[in-house]
Image: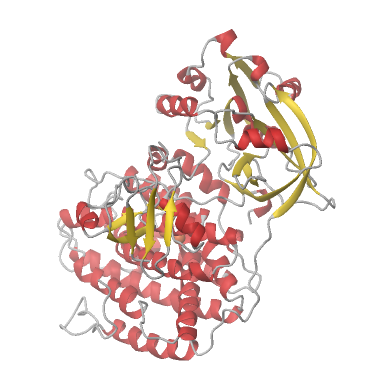
Amino acid sequence: MPSRPDTPPPAALFGRPRQDRFLRFLTHFADRYLALTTRTDPTGRHPATSRPPLRLTVTDRRAVAEDVVALRLAAADGTPLPPWRPGAHLDLRLPSGRTRQYSLCGDPAERHAYRIAVRRLPGGGGGSVEVHDTLTPGARVTVAGPRNAFPFAAQDRVLLLAGGIGVTPILPMAHEAARRGLDWRLVHCGRTRASLPLADELAALDARHPGRVHVRADDEHGPPDAARLLADAPPGAAVYCCGPGPLLDAVRAAFEASPAGALHAERFTAPPVVDGRPFSLRLRRSGTVLSVPADRTALDVLRAEDPATASSCRQGFCGVCRVRVLAGPVEHRDRRLTPAERAAGDMLVCVSRAPEGACLELDL
Amino acid sequence: MRQPADEPDGLVLQPRDVAFDWAGLPMHWIPGEPMATHVVNVLHLLLPEGERWFVRTFQEALPLITDDELREQVLGFIGQEALHADAHEGVLDHLHARGLDPGPYLRHVEFVFRRVLGERPGLPPHRARAYLTERVALIAGIEHVTAFLGDWVLNARGLDRAGADPTMLDLLRWHGAEEVEHRSVAYDLLRHLDPGYVRRTRAMFIAGPVLVRLWISGTRFLMAADPELPARSRPTWRGYTAAARRGLLPDPRRAARSAGRYFRPGYHPTHEGSTRQAVAYLGTSPAARAAAH
Ligand code: FES
Ligand SMILES: [Fe+2]
Ligand SMILES: [Fe+2]
């Protein structure tokens, strides 16, 4: 309960029972201070800054494995691009309007171009197919970033584990580890050798640093065994793992029993919507009705309407996206709200939904 | 001085869904050091209210942000602070169950963050915006302090040597690491709303001493309310400096120097603390690792 502006200070902690003097002083001070300092509004006096997204051109494209292309992206006028560190990614805004994140797999010292590698996934959301089909040399693409959701802390001993296309963020880490003279090892796993992207670059790395790069293909060595992979980690090593979900899960499960000391994996925000049905939202203040498709969250739709919509984890645990529902049946999917909060009409719009065709009236 | 150029940057901030089990936590979780324990325990009293106030304030600021990247940073920050508040509240519940009722002091903290710095309905729009900026400036100042403390606790080998409770150390270091990780956000938001020198330093001038005063009264309160200490136990300055020499508490001279750096015109939070160290700790933290599942 927010206390009312005229609430008196609570009692002092020590001594005679009376209002706490320090808090009384603070109250008077704040009231006077704010009366003075809020006379003029500072915002708007200075032009608001915002960095425009980068418009880049595909300057090179080459196949680096079955179904995998590597693209070089550069500014049309050749200006240097914002710097990045291993583990960083770009948000590519594709011509269809889709946004996809791809790890940077080039050399951070190369300031005039970025490199990404993309595997064509015909069954996916269509982003990788679009990249393969439309991003040919000369094509324009808008990108945001680089941002880093998989930072490399360059510990003294590191084990880099890559599964398939997951080698993209790992490769720059290996280069940095080599540059810093760390004790590092890289293991690249995949179905077959031909399916492993950037194999020539790993081979070159291996030639320069014998014994540090290991390639294992399932058709030669059998499926990877996470416990065995981790057993080779130097004691206390930091493990950086990027690859398909099952590999990551297996590494997590085997981690505690391994000699390794730290585990780092890329952090993704929003998991895809599972088993969603379309429904709609009605905003009380404006009366606007918004429809939420089966594959998007209520939060996505609200953010598209108002970018200042609050949210954070987008996984239903932080509570920041809480909205009051005035009417309509909510299908709660969060792991935070108490039964009392749900009964009062609270909803976490990043994950929770409504039955097919239902309309939720929100206090917005 | 560490080199920011060699650090990961542009970090995507996200809250981590951590959980801690306090069932086995002793009252004096730095064994034999009740005063140092309670100086640190003041965090559990101040932070749940304080960080929720950060969250409310920053939510209010969202509509004023015109930079997409800054908005994403602020959203990540809000979630991290919300989870910090929850985690510290868990310790409070445990203290209460062990016979230390934090209620009287909590009412002071609530008064500060809800009455003194709370909503002020009825302000005309320009004053409401200026009040918001003023609070963001206070938060930027406090975040300089939390980043200093985060950096300190990540490096406080004295706590390991003294055999401090490992779960509590993980809470403090996970929180400290996230404070270091997000140390620029409040400052960057303030610069976005008001790039001036005056508001930022004026706010620190106020936030610093008030925080010190709240800390002292919090420690006094906890030592007096601790059922396992003799009646009329009090913290002393001598006790503080002795504990600081053993590495159990931050060195007051280093704290003062750090606060002084905030007043430099060229100040930026990235010059304080190490993102690399924070990232490295989050890879080893049992709570942060479990949260990644
Ligand atoms: S954004 Fe965290 S609960 Fe919805
Ligand atoms: Fe925090
Ligand atoms: Fe913080």
| In-front residue for pair A145/B245 | A145
B58, above or below A13, in the image: above
Q: Pick out the residue farthest to the top.
A: A220
Q: Could you tell me which residue is drawn at 26 percent across and 77 percent down?
A: A3
Q: Pick out the residue farthest to the front.
A: A357
Inspect this view and state whether residue A87 appears. Answer: no
| In-front residue for pair A285/A264 | A285
Q: Position of residue B154 (x, y in %)?
A: 47, 50
Q: Where is residue B71 in the image (x, y as percent from the top left)?
A: 54, 61
Q: Position of residue B171 (x, y in %)?
A: 36, 49
Q: Pick out the residue farthest to the right.
A: A77
Coloring scheme used: secondary structure
Name the image quarter holding the C terminus of chain A: bottom left
Inspect this view and state whether residue B20 appears. Answer: yes
Q: Could you tell me which residue is drawn at 39 percent across and 72 percent down?
A: B212
Q: Could you tell me which residue is drawn at 14 percent across and 57 percent down?
A: B99
Left or right placement of residue A335 versus residue B123 in this view: left
| In-front residue for pair A81/B274 | A81
Query: Which quarter of the picture shows residue A16?
Result: bottom left
Q: Position of residue B25 (x, y in %)?
A: 24, 46
Left or right placement of residue A142 versus residue A100 in this view: right
Indicate the quadrant of ligand 2 in the picture: bottom left
Left or right placement of residue A340 versus residue B215 in this view: left
Name the image quarter holding the N terminus of chain A: bottom left
Left or right placement of residue B15 versus residue A9 in this view: right
How many marks are shown on the rendered structure?
0
Q: Could you tell me which residue is drawn at 29 percent across and 47 percent down?
A: A331
